[in-house]
C-alpha cells in the first residue's frame, strides 16, 4: 500500500494549526501570569502598565488565534475521517512530535526562568502559582498530543469533543476575566481622556509658574500664556474641546522694596471635568511633570502635588512659594 502524500493543503492546515496553538498557549500563560501579578502586587515592582498592554495583547491573540486553531483542527479531523490513510502523513507525525517537544522545552525554560526570578527575591506566592499554571497547562497539552499520536482521539471522538468544549470554556472565561480587570474599550478610552486632561493641566501649571517668574504676577487669563515664540498654546479639553477653568484665588505679602511689601496674588486653581476617579497606576498620578527650579533652591516641586480626582468637575488648588520660585522682577506696589 502506497504511503499517503502530503499536499499543500495538508501542510498549511497543520502548520497554521500548530502556529495558532503555540501562540494561544503562550498567550494563555501570559494572561495568567498578569492576573497573578495583579492579584498579589509586589512592592518592588515600581512600574505597572496603567493600560495593561500585556493583558490586551494576550487577550487579542487568544480571541483571534484560539478559534483559528479550533477551525483548522476541525478541517484536519474531518479530512482524516474521510481519508483514514492521512493519519500516516509525515506532516501530521512531525507536527505532533514537535508539539510534544515544544511543550517539554517550554516547561524546562519557564521553570528555569521562574526559579531564577524567585531566587532573585520574587514573592513566593507568585512563584508557586506560576509554576503550578505552567505545570498544569503543559502537562495537559503533553497528554493530549501523546494521545493524538497514539490514535486515542480517533477511537474516542466524543472524548475529543468534550476536551475541546471544556478548553473553549476555560479560554472564554480567561478572556472575560481580562475585561473585568482592564475594563471595556469604552472605559479605557475614558480613562485615557482623563489622563490627557491631567497632563494638560500639569503643562498649564508649569507655564503659569514660568509666567510668574518672568513677570512677578499671575496671568489674568489662560490665553496670556500663549507664546508663539516658545511654541506653547494653551490646550483645550480633548474630549469636549472646551477651555479649562482657571481662577486666581488668593495672595500673600511680598517685599517690593526694602521697606515696603505688597499683597500679590500667588494662589490659583485649575479645574476640569473627568469621566472617572483616578485609576490605580495612572501615569499622571505616578509621574508628575518636572518644573524648573531656581539655582540653589531644593525641595518639592509644585507639580508633585496630588493630581488625584474623582468623577465629575474637580479643581486643583495651587500656591506658588516665592522663596522657591522667586520672580525675576520685584512686584510693583499698587497705588
Image: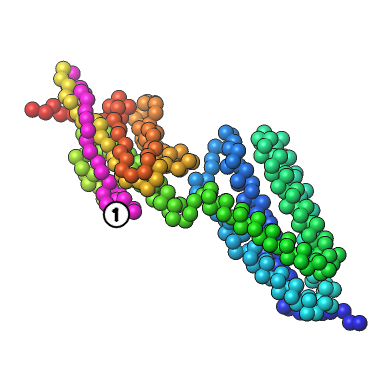
What residue appears at the point 59 percent right and 61 percent down from the top-left corner? Answer: 63
Q: Residue 214: x percent and y percent?
A: 25, 36
Is residue 233 shown to the viewer in this render? no
Q: Quadrant of the rendered structure where residue 125 is?
A: top right
Query: Which residue is pictured at 25% across the width and 35% down the height?
Result: 268
As drawn, which residue projects farthest toward the left?
335
Is residue 10 placed above or below 156 in the rendered structure? below
Chain part drawn in magenta: 233-258
Residue 135: give x, y in percent of width and height. 75, 48
Instruction: Say which residue label 1 marks.
Output: 241
Of the pair 315 and 297, the residue shown nearer to us: 315
Give the residue at x 20% y 42%: 221
**Residue 269 shows in this picture:** yes
Q: Quadrant of the C terminus?
A: top left
Q: Is residue 238 above or below residue 66?
A: above
Q: Residue furthest bottom?
A: 1
Residue located 70% across and 71% down the image: 74
Quadrant where the N terminus sits is bottom right
Q: Residue 226: x and y, percent?
A: 25, 47
Q: Horizontally, is 154 left or right of 234 in the view?
A: right
Observer-nearest of 24 and 178 = 178
244 in magenta = yes
Quarter of image, res 309:
top left
Number of other residues with Cα within 10 Å of mark 1, as a class: few under 14, some 14 to 19, many 20 or more:
few
Give 170 or 299, whichever is nearer the viewer.
170
233, 75: nearer the viewer: 75
Numbered-mark total: 1
State left or right for residue 212 relative to residue 96: left
Q: Magenta segment: does it hold 68? A: no
Tell me the quarter of the picture where residue 291 sits: top left
> Residue farthest to the right?
1
Element assignment for label 1:
loop
Amino acid at each position: 500500500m502506497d504511503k499517503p502524500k502530503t499536499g499543500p493543503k495538508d501542510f498549511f492546515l497543520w502548520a497554521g494549526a500548530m502556529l495558532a496553538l503555540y501562540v494561544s498557549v503562550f498567550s494563555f500563560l501570559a494572561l495568567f501570569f498578569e492576573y497573578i501579578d495583579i492579584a498579589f502586587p509586589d512592592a518592588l515592582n515600581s512600574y505597572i502598565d496603567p493600560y495593561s498592554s500585556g493583558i490586551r495583547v494576550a487577550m487579542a491573540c487568544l480571541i483571534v488565534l484560539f478559534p483559528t486553531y479550533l477551525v483548522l483542527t476541525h478541517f484536519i479531523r474531518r479530512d482524516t475521517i474521510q481519508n483514514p490513510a492521512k493519519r500516516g502523513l509525515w506532516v501530521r507525525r512531525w507536527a505532533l512530535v514537535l508539539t510534544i517537544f515544544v511543550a517539554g522545552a517550554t516547561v524546562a525554560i519557564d521553570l528555569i526562568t521562574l526559579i531564577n526570578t524567585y531566587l532573585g527575591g520574587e514573592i513566593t506566592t507568585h512563584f508557586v502559582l506560576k509554576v503550578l499554571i505552567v505545570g498544569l497547562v503543559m502537562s495537559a497539552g503533553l497528554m493530549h498530543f501523546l494521545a493524538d499520536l497514539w490514535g486515542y482521539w480517533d477511537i474516542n471522538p466524543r472524548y475529543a469533543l468534550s476536551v475541546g468544549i471544556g478548553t473553549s470554556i476555560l479560554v472564554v472565561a480567561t478572556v472575560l476575566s481580562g475585561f473585568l480587570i482592564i475594563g471595556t474599550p469604552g472605559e479605557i478610552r475614558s480613562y485615557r481622556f482623563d489622563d490627557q486632561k491631567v497632563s494638560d493641566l500639569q503643562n498649564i501649571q508649569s507655564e503659569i509658574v514660568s509666567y510668574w517668574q518672568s513677570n512677578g504676577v499671575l496671568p489674568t487669563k489662560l490665553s496670556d500664556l500663549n507664546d508663539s515664540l516658545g511654541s506653547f498654546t494653551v490646550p483645550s479639553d480633548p474630549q469636549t474641546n472646551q477651555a479649562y477653568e482657571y481662577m486666581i484665588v488668593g495672595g500673600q505679602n511680598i517685599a517690593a522694596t526694602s521697606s515696603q511689601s505688597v499683597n500679590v496674588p500667588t494662589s490659583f486653581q485649575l479645574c476640569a471635568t473627568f469621566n472617572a476617579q483616578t485609576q490605580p497606576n495612572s501615569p499622571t498620578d505616578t509621574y508628575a511633570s518636572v518644573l524648573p527650579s531656581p539655582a540653589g533652591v531644593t525641595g518639592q516641586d509644585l507639580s508633585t502635588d496630588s493630581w488625584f480626582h474623582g468623577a465629575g468637575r474637580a479643581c486643583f488648588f495651587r500656591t506658588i512659594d516665592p522663596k522657591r520660585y522667586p520672580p525675576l522682577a520685584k512686584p510693583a506696589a499698587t497705588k
